[in-house]
Amino acid sequence: MFSIFRKEINTFFSSLIGYIVIGVFLVLMGLVMWVFPEFSVLDNNYANLDTLFGIAPMVFMFLIPAVTMRTFAEEKQTGTIELLVTRPITDWQIVGGKFLACFVLVVFALVPTVLYYFAVYRLGAPPGNLDSGGILGSYIGLLFLAAAFVAIGIFASSLTNNQIVAFVLATFLCFFVYLAFDFLSRLPVFFGKTDDIVQAIGIEYHYKSVSRGVLDTRDVVYFLSVIALFLAATVLSLGRRRW
């Protein structure tokens, strides 16, 4: 698995993919955080990073599929998938290596945003008047969210040999799993406690829960289950070649 991970990371940073992903994410977040007056921290009366954690999931819905779309689709398109699967490694190791590589790239994109924390920390009145616990919880929530989106994106890439199709499919699945259940829970069909159950199926419900600064076991189990589900689905998708 480490050899796959190293190969993918080298591919990201030996080309422009990794730098473009990190650059686009930081530019978008920087513009939203400090330039656009509707969202700018400088025009807000409170020192917080709510803008970052509110906008980042929307950016991830498009950014992460752009990272994962090539993982298996390109291998199938170029025919190198046959060389990959004949190596003395299991399908789980292949999927795990690609998953970790894409996740690490997203983490690299998130790390520079820690500077925003120190900037807002100094802007507080008095300096340091900031909910650090809530911010830490929000970062943990973003990492879980990124891991879930990466697993979804890899699954979408394993279904096709066209990278554009993989991108569109992954974006749709990320949007659906993140937001659709919240919309569905508002339908009059669901009433009583059923609307809460439907809402809890979506990622947004658990992401907001973690962002409050309280790491609930149920939220951790949910994210790990979603990640494991889509990784297992990816392994099954790769197994189709044997069927």
Image (tube, helix red, strand yellow):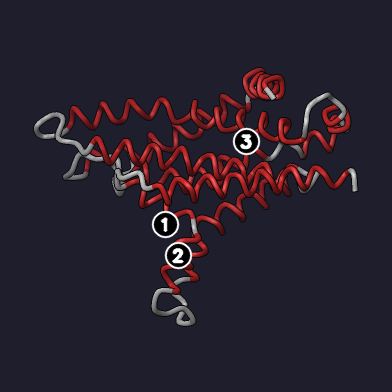
| Res. 205 mark | 1
Q: Where is residue 162 in the image (x, y as percent from the top left)?
A: 78, 44
Packing grade of label 2 (10 A; few <14, some 14-19, many >=20) is: many
Asked if 199 appears above or below 138 in the picture, the reply is below
Considering only order in the chain, which callout, 3 or 1, is on the residue closer to the N terminus? 3
Packing grade of label 3 (10 A; few <14, some 14-19, many >=20) is: many
Residue occupying the point 57% across, 40% down? 64
Looking at the rendered structure, the secondary structure element under dot 2 is helix
Residue at image mark 2:
199
Please name the amino acid that badge 1 sits on.
Tyr
Q: Where is residue 10 in the image (x, y as percent from the top left)?
A: 66, 18
Residue occupying the point 82% across, 28% down? 84
Residues at discs 3 and 2 in contact (Cβ within 8 Å): no
Whole-Å distance between the Cαs marked 1 and 3? 25 Å
Eye-nearest disc, 1 or 3: 1
* Residue 115 left/right relative to 102: left
Residues at discs 2 and 1 in contact (Cβ within 8 Å): yes
Asked if 173 appears above or below 103 in the picture, the reply is below
Whole-Å distance between the Cαs marked 2 and 1? 7 Å
Packing grade of label 1 (10 A; few <14, some 14-19, many >=20) is: some
Residue at image mark 3:
67
